[in-house]
């Protein structure tokens, strides 16, 4: 009897410490359901505009002539230009690269690599003898914006395959998200869960759910369209933590976790934000 | 007269020698502070916790040392060490506590 009780106790402890990704995702949705009982959680793909009616109206008006439109056009033009060897981006991706952003990041069980969409775009270039593009803005962000645009309306569908390396990558991203860091000792969680919908000076903070569905983003602050990792770097700097390189293992793992948490939510990239 | 001149030169030489020793001591102190700071920041970086401000302090310390201001250089290097130690402390604490805030 004593052994049985100990086993039960250990099971409960282990189950709490080592929740599966799907348990994490459902618990996160429950967290936001309780925090915002009147909010349709699917609206959270629109970031702060899910909370702030006034800002939402301005944003909807801006969407009549969206500032990221140029990036989509430039991205489409760049996407169809063949490489020097005659191949093109379409040859590197399933379905010719159209409507696939919801599947990224994906874990490649053959190579053991965690592959974000931007990582895959540059890998496509280098595999075909081309120079990689800068990660944060410009042509790479434009191609990503175009591919995101073709994926609009699809549901986020990030998969963690039955491979301990994939689960480890997810867990590392999760740990990063919930760990306080930097001189200000802020975790991602402090702003985007505890303080979601609160004002940080003049800015309303978005919630974590849906944060991975709408990238790349044209930020008025940047004056251009940039990638999610550019935002990660900015967040790190804001809490005075040393940022990592874009597409570093740390950021790819963070994106993996963040994207999995948005599974089932509608893809709506590219988007515009303040 | 000759004795006075000899004494004056001796005093100047002694002063110059002491100043050189003082400078050497400061430079050594700076090198020690720099090494300690670098080690601490490396540890913070390994623990994914380096602050964005710490390496700037080290660069400023190097500049101060290059201009001969070892007092300032040591102070800046020590400040970087302190930041590194605080970052490591955060890392060690968070390693034990981050799970507490995950929704279950």
Image (tube, rainbow, N blue to C red):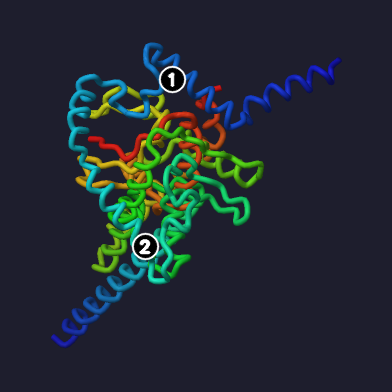
Q: Name the residue under label 2.
A: B30
Q: Let me know if residue A163 appears in the view.
A: yes
Kindly indicate the quadrant of the structure image that contains residue A167.
Answer: top right
Name the residue rendered at 24%, 40% in the picture.
A219
Name the residue rendered at 58%, 51% in the picture.
A108
Residue A200 or B71: which is nearer the viewer? A200
Residue A204: horizontal and vertical position, in percent? 27, 26
Residue A179: horizontal and vertical position, in percent? 47, 36
Name the residue rendered at 39%, 33% in the picture.
A153
Residue ranking furthest to the right: A1
**Dot 1: element:** helix
Chain of the residue under the numbered disc 1 shown in the image = A
Residue A139 or A190: which is nearer the viewer? A139
Residue A71: horizontal and vertical position, in percent? 26, 48
Residue B60 or A228: which is nearer the viewer? A228
Residue A11 or A115: which is nearer the viewer? A115
Kindly indicate the quadrant of the structure image that contains residue B72.
Answer: bottom left
Above or below, comparing residue B21 to residue B64 in the picture = below
Q: Do labels 2 and 1 share a chain?
A: no
Q: Between label 2 and label 1, give the one nearer the viewer.
A: 1
Q: Name the residue under label 1.
A: A32
Residue ranking furthest to the bottom: B2
Graded by Cα atoms within 10 Å as few (under 14), some (14 to 19) or many (20 or more), the crowding at tag 1 reads: many
Residue A267: horizontal and vertical position, in percent? 40, 34
Graded by Cα atoms within 10 Å as few (under 14), some (14 to 19) or many (20 or more), the crowding at tag 2 reads: many
Mark drawn on residue A95: none
Compared across the picture, whether A55 is left or right of A245 comes to: left
């Amino acid at each position: 009897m004593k052994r049985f009780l100990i086993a039960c106790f250990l099971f409960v402890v282990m189950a709490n410490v080592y929740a599966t990704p799907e348990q994490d995702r459902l618990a996160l949705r429950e967290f936001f359901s309780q925090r915002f009982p009147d909010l349709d959680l699917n609206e959270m793909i629109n970031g702060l505009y899910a909370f702030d009616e006034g800002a939402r109206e301005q944003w909807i008006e801006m969407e009549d002539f969206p500032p990221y439109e140029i990036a989509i056009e430039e991205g489409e033009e760049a996407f169809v230009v063949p490489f020097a060897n005659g191949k093109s981006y379409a040859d590197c991706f399933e379905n010719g690269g159209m409507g696939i952003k919801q599947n990224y990041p994906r874990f490649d069980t053959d190579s053991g690599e965690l592959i974000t969409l931007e990582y895959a775009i540059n890998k496509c270039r280098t595999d075909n003898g081309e120079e990689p593009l800068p990660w944060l803005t410009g042509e790479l962000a434009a191609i990503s914006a175009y591919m995101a645009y073709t994926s609009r309306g699809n549901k986020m569908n990030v998969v963690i395959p039955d491979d301990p390396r994939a689960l480890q990558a997810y867990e590392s991203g999760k740990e990063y998200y919930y760990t306080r860091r930097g001189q200000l000792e802020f975790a991602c969680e402090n702003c985007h869960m505890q303080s979601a919908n609160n004002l940080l000076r003049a800015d309303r903070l978005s919630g974590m759910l849906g944060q991975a569905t709408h990238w790349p983003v044209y930020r008025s602050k940047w004056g251009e369209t940039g990638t999610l990792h550019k935002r990660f770097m900015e967040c790190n700097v804001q809490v005075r933590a040393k940022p990592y390189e874009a597409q570093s293992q740390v950021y790819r793992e963070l994106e993996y976790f963040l994207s999995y948490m948005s599974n089932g939510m509608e893809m709506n990239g590219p988007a515009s934000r303040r | 007269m000759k004795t006075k001149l000899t004494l004056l030169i001796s005093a100047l030489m002694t002063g110059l020698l002491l100043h050189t020793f003082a400078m050497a001591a400061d430079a050594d102190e700076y090198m020690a502070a720099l090494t300690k700071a670098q080690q601490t920041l490396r540890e913070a970086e390994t623990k994914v916790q380096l602050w964005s401000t710490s390496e700037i302090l080290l660069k400023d310390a190097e500049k101060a040392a290059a201009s001969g201001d070892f007092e300032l250089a040591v102070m800046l290097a020590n400040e970087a060490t302190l930041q590194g130690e605080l970052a490591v402390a955060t890392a060690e604490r968070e390693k034990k506590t981050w799970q507490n805030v995950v929704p279950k």
